[in-house]
Amino acid sequence: MEDIIVVTTETIPGYKILEIKGVARGGIVKATHIGRDIMAAFRNIAGGEVKEYTKMMAEAREEALKRMIIHAKKLGANAVINMRFATSNIGSSIAEVYAYGTAVVVEKE
């Protein structure tokens, strides 16, 4: 699978934008499981980082990013600029992670 450039900036140093393909997007909805919820409850009492949720959300971000890249390639892009993550709660133990950006075709200057 060919690599794709993904940046959070409007431009890519050393590259020229030739074409805008549209919005590339990828999302995932993750639910916690009872084991994580129990550990989170204990950590909530004691305070501190809830490592189980930190790991779960990191995995969700990676999957959303992967899906965004797949979508960008389907659009015919070789780069994504202005990439962002958005997160929202859908339920008490369910979160959506969304990655999006502008799919573009670039070439080296």
Image (cartoon, helix red, strand yellow):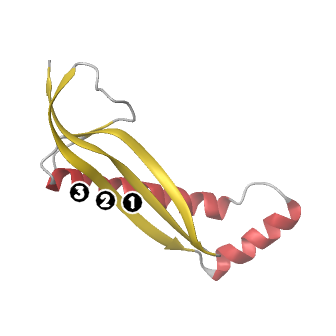
Residue positioned 14% across, 17% down in the render? 109
Circle nearer the N terminus (3, 1): 1
Residue positioned 33% across, 30% down in the render? 10
Q: What x and y, as percent, mark residue 104?
A: 20, 39
Residue picked out by circle 2:
67
How many C-alpha atoms fall within 10 Å of the one at disc 2: few (<14), some, or many (≥20)? many
* Residue 63 marker: 1
Q: Quadrant of residue 83?
A: top left
Mark 2 and 3 residues: CB-CB less than 8 Å, in contact? Answer: yes
How many C-alpha atoms fall within 10 Å of the one at disc 1: few (<14), some, or many (≥20)? some
Disc 2 residue type (three-letter): Arg
Count of residue discs: 3
Mark 2 and 1 residues: CB-CB less than 8 Å, in contact? Answer: yes
How many C-alpha atoms fall within 10 Å of the one at disc 3: few (<14), some, or many (≥20)? some
Q: Is residue 68 above or below residue 13?
A: below
The span from disc 2 to disc 1 (Cα, nearest Å) is 6 Å
SS for callout 2: helix
The span from disc 3 to disc 1 (Cα, nearest Å) is 12 Å
* Residue 71 marker: 3
Disc 3 residue type (three-letter): His
Residue positioned 67% across, 59% down in the render? 51
Disc 1 residue type (three-letter): Glu
The span from disc 2 to disc 3 (Cα, nearest Å) is 6 Å
Mark 3 and 1 residues: CB-CB less than 8 Å, in contact? Answer: no
Task: Looking at the picture, tell me which residue is in the foreground, 10 or 78.
Answer: 10
Depth-wise, is mark 3 or mark 1 nearer the camera? 3
